[in-house]
Amino acid sequence: MTQHPVSNELWNHDLAPTSAAQRTWRWYHFGALWVGMVISIPAYMLASSLIESGMSAWQAVVTVFLANVIVLLPMLLIGHAGTKYGIPYAVLARASFGTRGARLPALMRAIVACGWYGIQTWFGGSMIYTLLGVLLGSPISGDALPGLGINAGQLACFLAFWAIQMYFVVHGMESIRKLETYTAPLKIAICFVLLGWVYGQVGGFGPLLDQPSQFVEGGPKAGMFWSVFWPSLTAMIGYWATLALNIPDFTRFAKTQRDQVIGQSLGLPLPMALLAALAVTVTSATIVLYGKALWDPVDVASRMTGVAVLVALLILLIDTASVNLAANLVGPAYDFSALSPQRISYRVGGYITAGFALVMMPWKILETTQNYIFIWLTGYSALLGPIAGIMIIDYYFIRKTVLDVDQLYRDQGEYTYRGGWNIAALVAFTAGVLPNLPGFLNAALPASFPNVDETFKSIYTYAWFIGVVIAAIVYGLMMKGRTAPAPRTAAKVST
């Protein structure tokens, strides 16, 4: 049997009474985690890309806010088990997929997170590259390296930022928590710096917020709003689809359900909407100033003058490191560890994550908004949506939130199913993924799959929703009649 990773101290520490000040501090820690992950360059680019797609500022902000309210629901539902039982995502998945089958959702989540880890590392390297150009007085240039598509300077800066993050990989979860807690205020400060710069350059916010949508009658994309809105909404949800699954990796450290509910409810939708407002305002300003939408904040920051550009880039650099480590290292490190707990520790899992990030060439994903939104974000949401649907149905409707934690760690027990695999979960996962496959292939490889039926293209537009619903229904029907076992071990107390 695998050793139980949850200590008695973790399971019993919330029996002690806490003051209102202590509860507020706990909420701040959980909220700071979210603020740290929300205020990030990929999230900024996600919102700013909506302006490039033709939305007005208000349409973009509402789209982002709506998506985050929707994805908050599975986060709260799945996060409940982490707080109640003190278990990470990879262990919770054993209840529905089986003790061995849980490796499938763990691996899916881990691979996606590796991609994000590489993307954020590329952003950090880009900032070092830009910062060096500012300090040297002229941009660094050079011929692209064969097979890579970037020059030697860009590659060196990418590797340098990768090496900087390894310090926190080596020093573990506590160093990441501290980084997130104390850098959150800096990230809020840089938002106001950017807004102040925009206000000074354009002479007010009015000309920016009054920019009309391109979808209005007579506009260049008249009548096309819904064809852009739905895939954009799916992509926004897809952005947080990874954390919607592995949120128990974080909520397992929350002392009460109130902590995780309040922390997530305040920490995700509102900050994300505020970041969207910032992103669309600054992006609208770039249209006024430069005649085109600049959706990369590093590019925008590099156009600032004086000491402001140095401060902006340094804060963005700290922000990128803290977001990347909290959002894209913790989850896959646990997931890789779950594949072979005897051989792969949490730290070794972090090394594997960082290694994958080197070989995924993340700059290719960011070449266009089409690659970023419709292939990367929407594509992996089609994989992760079915897993969320299965886990929610299993935990709430099949097991009524009752888990036998000791059995989750036994190779032969209640959650072994058939050889460690739950066939119902595998069938439901496949059923949730297959309808989205033709649309994904057409989006990712249009030259190879040009004749995909319009029906499948439309289905792919709602990839996350389709996957969640189909997998949930199939799993619920196949598991109908199964009752949850009576727990033989005490749960981590929460209120």
Image (tube, helix red, strand yellow):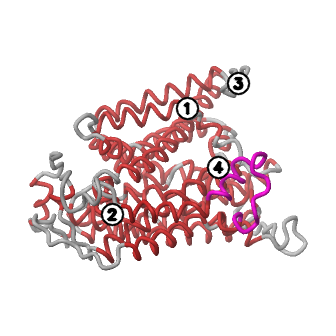
Look at the picture and state if 248 lies above or below 320: below
Amino acid under label 3?
Ser
Tell which residue pokes out farthest to the right in this image.
218
The residue located at (47%, 41%) in the rendering is 114
Q: Which residues are magenta?
A: 437-457
The residue located at (28%, 75%) in the rendering is 482
Q: Earlier in the sequence, mark 4 or mark 3?
A: 3
Within 10 angstroms of label 4, few (less than 14), some, or many (20 or more) residues? Answer: many
Residue 460 image position (x, y, % from top left): 65, 63
Identify the residue under disc 3: 138
Mark nearest the camera among 1 and 2 is 2
Q: Which residue occupies the foreground of this view, 381 or 35?
A: 381
Task: State the CA–CA distance, disc 4 to disc 3.
Answer: 29 Å
Q: Earlier in the sequence, mark 1 or mark 3?
A: 1
Amino acid under label 2?
Ser
Q: Earlier in the sequence, mark 1 or mark 4?
A: 1
Mark nearest the camera among 4 and 2 is 2
Identify the residue under disc 4: 372
Residue 445 on the magenta segment? yes
Task: State the CA–CA distance, disc 1 to disc 3.
Answer: 17 Å
